[in-house]
Image (cartoon, rainbow, N blue to C red):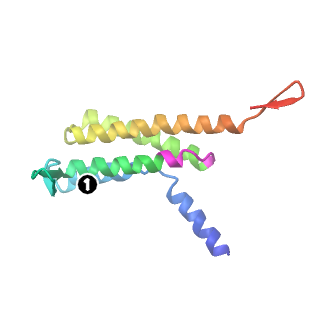
Amino acid sequence: MAQAARKSSIMMYVFAFPMLIVPFAIYNMIAYLMNMDFHQTVFSVPLISGHLMEVSTGDVLVLLGVILLYIEILKSTRFSTKAIVDHVLSIILFIVMIVEFIVAEKAATSTFLILTALSFVDVVGGFTITIRTAQRDVTFESEGRTAS
């Protein structure tokens, strides 16, 4: 029983960091360590029309970012100290991404711009959803009755 509680506590800390750091880190590894091009085709998908849709490295990173943004939006529905820390870390990640986009030559790509936009949506959406959720939990008393 104690082990299950400890395991769930560990999982909460795993999710207490911004998930969009994963595509950001992968982007930097590909750009700086592997020195690869983000327009390089990873795989092709045959379509009914007979054409092949080529999926590039940048496309895969953007898709990963969209999926992780969905998880981030789900995470922002909870209200706790960990959620506040997660929001602060998301803001820091967004600022770092903006600075890297402006300063670093290898970050001046459309893939990185889209990942930065996803980070912006994470910051704004996270705070908006957290505030809306907190408003529902607050009750105000007026003239002997409770109103939401």
Q: Residue furthest right?
A: 144
Quarter holding the N terminus is: bottom right
- Residue 17 shown in magenta: no
Residue that badge 1 annotates: 29
Can the viewer see residue 145?
A: yes
Q: Which of 14 and 56 is in front in this view?
A: 56
Measuring from the top left, give residue 115's x and y in whole percent: 32, 42
- In the rendered view, does 38 fall on the left or right side of 22? left
Q: Residue at x 62, y 47 (%)?
A: 81
Measuring from the top left, give residue 70's x and y in whole percent: 43, 47
Q: Nearer the viewer, residue 85 or 51?
A: 51
Q: What residue type is labelled 1?
A: Met
Q: Residue at x 56, y 64 (%)?
A: 10
- In the rendered view, does 85 fall on the left or right side of 118? right
Element carrying mark 1: helix
Which span is picked out in magenta? 73-81
